[in-house]
Image (tube, rainbow, N blue to C red):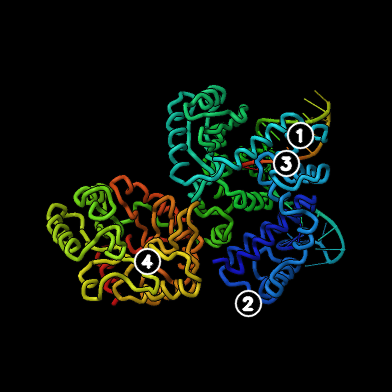
Amino acid sequence: MARANDEAAALIQELADLLSITGGDAFKIRAYEKSARAIAGHPDDISGLDLAGLRKIPTVGEAIAKKILDYTTTGTIRQVEELRAQIPAGVRALTAVPTLGPKKALAVYEELGVSSVDELETAIGEGRLRGLKGFGAKTEENILRGIELMRGSGERVLVDAAAGIADEVVAALSGLPQVERCEHAGSLRRMRETIGDVDVLVASTDPRPIMAAFAALPLVHEVIASGDKKTSIRTAKGLQVDLRVVPPESWGAALQYFTGSQAHNIRTREIAVKAGLKLSEYGLFDAESGALIVSETEDEVYERLGLPWVHPALREDTGEIEAALAGELPRLVTVDDLRGDLHSHTDLTDGIAPLEDMVAAAADRGLEYYAITDHAPNLFMQRMTDEKMLAQREQVRALQASFPDLALLHGTELNIDPDGNVDWDADFLAGFDICVASIHSHFTQDQGTMTRRLVRACENPHVHVIGHPTARSIGRRAPVDADWDEVFRAAARTGTAMEIDSFPDRLDLPADLIRRAKRLGVRFSVDTDAHSVGHHRNIRYGVGTAQRGWLTPDDVINTWPLERLREFLGKA
DNA sequence: GTAACTAATTACTATAGCTCGCAAGCTAT
């Protein structure tokens, strides 16, 4: 799975981290970080590029190009090796402890020889940090809590968990008389697949009572910091929530700023500086006079910078600024664009709701078509049989009369076996309106075998969609290892769609692979994979992932009118 | 280290709050 691009980017990022510890020039460090992102996001494989080719990557100049070449020829970068010899890996790991940055990490290493998180904990226990310049009792306490957090629940949470907290905070604060506007921002608004902390923004002229009300919410376990402009709390499960209160006239600039990403903000601020402006969370200002120019809405902020409004899902500095400047931003697919859902389950297999309830829920979503795709026999615990499947088909056909505005498709979710074959022979498969095929076993095959397996599934004329293609489970199971570009070329060639599964712990395909697949001409299906009525609500996360993959409605087959979809399903 | 309207220098996002120690650095975003 790790491409040369990703490995080279990781090395360059490590170089930046190590330099920040040894106290290198801050701008040099930023240059490395920038180029690491650019290399990771570069569409072409860097292993075939020469010095000139590498330098064509934005932010990669002479020196970094040579380092990448060093990597592609020797497998590593000399400067990284040298710094590794100087700074043990454990010291770099120390900077992962919240409240312990590069400066303090270096101090404990140089003064006390501490080079791992465990050693740091011991050193604090023995009182060895006392007397170190810049380390007081409070710092000790904060580091210990940081270590505890890092080991415990302070990890990133799935997007639905963060969305639940954000919705609760926004609902509670929106009711306060002092609050003029209230929305969540941050990585949740950008729909990242996991969320480190929740950002909530309020517009008001009277912050005090809002901060007090926020700190008193039932979900608050601990108040980390509180001032007039910002209050940070932690929930019982360890999720940090930051509340910022800004004046109403700063709303647009503040929302833009707190939505991030940091990399995107750096780019927008650079554009401001070049135009003789200054952009901060309080507004867009004339750099010389300091006069406020605009900032009431995000639209105004972008417009004054010479850019169209950029959708939050694109704000990662992976090409959206260039596309915006060129007027080539994609019109992203939205939940409202979807006419159908092509992957769902009932209580015939492992769903918990009967067919009628699932179909009624689809009708409530306002869909025009809906596919029932229960599991196929080779997923043995589901006890599927030919007879059960055919009986369900009769039920679906009969139910159709009750839903004149919702076309029901009878399908199945097939299992791609280790060789790339699926359940049932061609004759039986031909009886389905749609077949999704997914990997449910043998996740650890080597890359070559896995690639052939997926390509073979695409080449099956009865397989229309590859379900949750990487089979990952976020935080629990790694994605399968395949040569994705080869899989995507097969999908494009055979007219097989790649699914974007909306389950918050799947979000599969992930956004970076979506972008690669789209470049190779692949189509997508954004589905809920619903196993209950409530799962239909997950569609927002699948659509968010599709947006992060720069997809337009035309890229997504279940935005198409039913007739066009039917043509696609007749791929054979 | 890179990019740019000084072509050899120059600028590089901007702010809040905390901590230590009483002005300034660090961390986080």
User: In terms of secondary structure, where does tag 4 sit?
Assistant: strand
From this view, report whether residue A480 is shown above or below residue A117. below
The amino acid type found where label 4 is placed reads: Ile
Residue for point 39% across, 52% down:
A503
Q: First in sequence, mark 3 or 2: give its number.
A: 2
Real-space Cα separation, disc 4 to disc 3, in angstroms: 48 Å
Foreground mark, 4 or 1, reads: 1
Mark 2 and mark 4: Cα distance apart in space: 30 Å
Task: Report the Cα–Cα distance between label 1 and label 2.
Answer: 53 Å
What numbered label is drawn on residue A120?
A: 3
Residue at label 4? A466
Q: Position of residue A44 (x, y in %)?
A: 57, 72
Given contact means CB atoms under 8 Å apart, are the residues at marks 1 and 2 in contact? no
Question: Which residue was labeled with disc 1?
Answer: A126
Q: Which mark is residue A48?
A: 2
Ranked by sequence position, the earlier of labels 4 and 1 is 1
Residue type pointed to by label 3: Leu
Q: Badge 4 sits on which subunit? A: A
| Three-letter residue code for mark 2 | Gly
